[in-house]
């Protein structure tokens, strides 16, 4: 039920963002970005979002676009930065394991498209 909680949080974030300015505006599209570390299954998140959006009048027709961001790390030994696909934590250049995570665990609403009429 990981994705259901995330879908609820997306809706909360959107309502907080849009609600204070234009509470009656219909939302068309939400672009959500999450780092790969969150292990989100896009199909499951879309399903959860579509299930709960019906209970929110301004979100009923909204489309959720999910973009998964790669994990980037910096090596403490050689200083180079690598992009890794899966939590396989070693430097792509020198195979060092002393690495610092730069991104990959973030989760946020990147943009919200509103129906301007
Ligand atoms: Zn290295």
Image: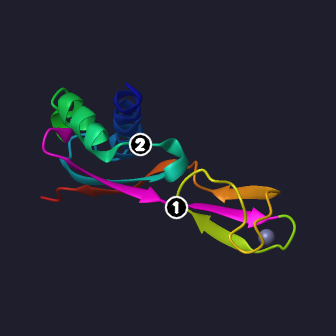
Nearer to us in this view, 44 or 78:
78
Residue 41: image location, x then y, percent: 35, 43
Element type at mark 2:
loop
Quadrant of residue 116 in the image?
Answer: bottom left
Residue 29: % across, % down: 23, 54
Q: Is residue 23 magenta?
A: no
* Image side of residue 39 versus residue 14, left or right: right
| Residue shown at 19% from the left, 39% from the top | 58
Residue linked to disc 2: 40
Q: Quadrant of the N terminus?
A: top left
Secondary structure under the numbered disc 1 in the rendered image? loop
- What residue do we see at 13% from left, 44% from top? 61
Does 7 sit left or right of 63 as displayed?
A: right
Q: Quadrant of residue 19?
A: top left
Q: Is residue 106 above or below residue 55?
A: below
Please name whichever residue, 28 or 40, is drawn nearer the observer in this view of the structure: 40
Q: Main secondary structure of the magenta part?
A: strand
Q: Is residue 69 magenta?
A: yes
- Which residue lies under the disc numbered 1? 70
Relative height, residue 9 to residue 17 (above, below):
above
Which residue is nearer to you in this view: 67 or 98? 98
Ligand 1 resides in the quarter of the picture at bottom right
Residue under the point 87% across and 68% down: 77
């Amino acid at each position: 039920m990981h994705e259901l909680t995330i879908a609820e949080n997306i809706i909360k974030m959107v309502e907080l963002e849009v609600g204070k300015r234009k509470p009656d505006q219909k939302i068309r599209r939400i672009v959500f970005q999450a780092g790969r570390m969150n292990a989100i299954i896009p199909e499951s998140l879309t399903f959860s979002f579509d299930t709960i959006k019906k209970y929110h009048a301004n979100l009923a027709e909204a489309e959720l676009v999910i973009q998964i961001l790669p994990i980037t790390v910096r090596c403490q030994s050689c200083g180079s930065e690598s992009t890794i696909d899966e939590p396989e934590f070693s430097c792509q250049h020198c195979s060092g394991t002393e690495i610092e995570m730069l991104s990959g665990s973030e989760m946020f609403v990147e943009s919200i498209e509103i129906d301007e009429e």
